[in-house]
Image: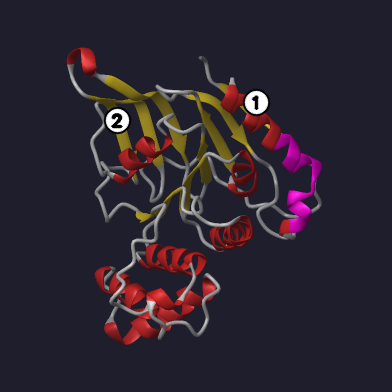
Amino acid sequence: MPSTQRDCRVSSSSSSQIVDTGRSAGERGAIRLHNVSQRYGTGADAVTAVGPVDLDVPPGEFLVLVGASGCGKSTLLRLIAGFEPATSGEVVVSGAAPVPGVSSGVVFQQPRLFPWKTVGGNVDLALKYAKVPKSERAARRDELLERVGLDDTAHRRIWEISGGQQQRVAIARALAAETSLLLLDEPFAALDALTRERLQEDVRAVSSDNGRTNVFVTHSADEAAFLGSRIVVLTKRPGRVALDLTSPLPRTGVEPEELRGSPEYAEIGAAVKEAAVA
């Protein structure tokens, strides 16, 4: 299926984040996928999970990959993270081949925290690996926890906090790496609806106050409409680009309830749903 590019025009008096799409692919946080495909198995048993896919993501963009289960969106995320090499094509992150744990921070579906460490200890470990000086770690840790709404929790044990709070810790830990790229693989899928909405708001707010590139995987059209400055819908397996939509919804200066209640938000969600089931 040929891909469709759309630019939804949304009128708003609020200021929106401006993304410089003219930057070169060699800059920090930029992603380039050229004719990328991923196959598993050999011979008659080989299965193409995704591709071919071509995408250029400029620094600072919040890209949401959305599609039905099994369409290859998490596979693309693993390729961008460098967890596995592409069968064919080229994956470039910040001007080079991606290196796991170096090119990007990753937040998974499950928090994957160290249960024997405190909330602060989990973030401290990430700061240590990011080579933040020991004398600066406590202040930086507290700053990160505050950014994700976990003030005064550094001393608490992982089993003492809720699932939503644990996922907030995972996000803070990923931000601690101070990479120019953050990858999020359906991080809210296991959470209840209210907690999920609150975390969407947290992630959206954090993404608006830094220049980091974000790639977020979801199967929810509403989540994609709320979070993405750009939304790419994949077809059923093998996943290819069915829709590439630039969202002009404001990134700052608007309350979440106002955003979710706007006709423009509904229009974007409907376009994503239509492309996902085509």
Provide residue 40's location: percent of width, then percent of height: 24, 26
Q: Which residue is mark 2?
A: 90
Q: Which residue is mark 1?
A: 274
Number of on-image labels? 2
Residue in front for this viewpoint, 210 or 264:
264
Which secondary structure, mark 1? helix
Residue lying farthest top?
44
Can residue 47 be seen from the camera position used here? yes
Relative side of 62 to 7, left or right: left
Q: Residue visible at 37% across and 32% down?
A: 33
Residue in front for this viewpoint, 89 or 26:
89
Can residue 9 be seen from the camera position used here? no
Q: What amino acid is found at the position of numbered circle 2 in the picture?
A: Glu
User: Which SS type dominates the magenta stretch?
Assistant: helix
CA neighbours of label 1 inside 10 A, class few (<14), some (14 to 19), many (20+)? few
Residue in front for this viewpoint, 213 or 163:
163
Provide residue 32's location: percent of width, then percent of height: 38, 35
Q: Residue visible at 47% across and 23% down?
A: 236
Provide residue 48's location: percent of width, then percent of height: 32, 21
Q: What amino acid is found at the position of numbered circle 1 in the picture?
A: Glu
Q: Residue visible at 74% across and 35% down?
A: 267
Residue extent of the magenta highlight: 257-268
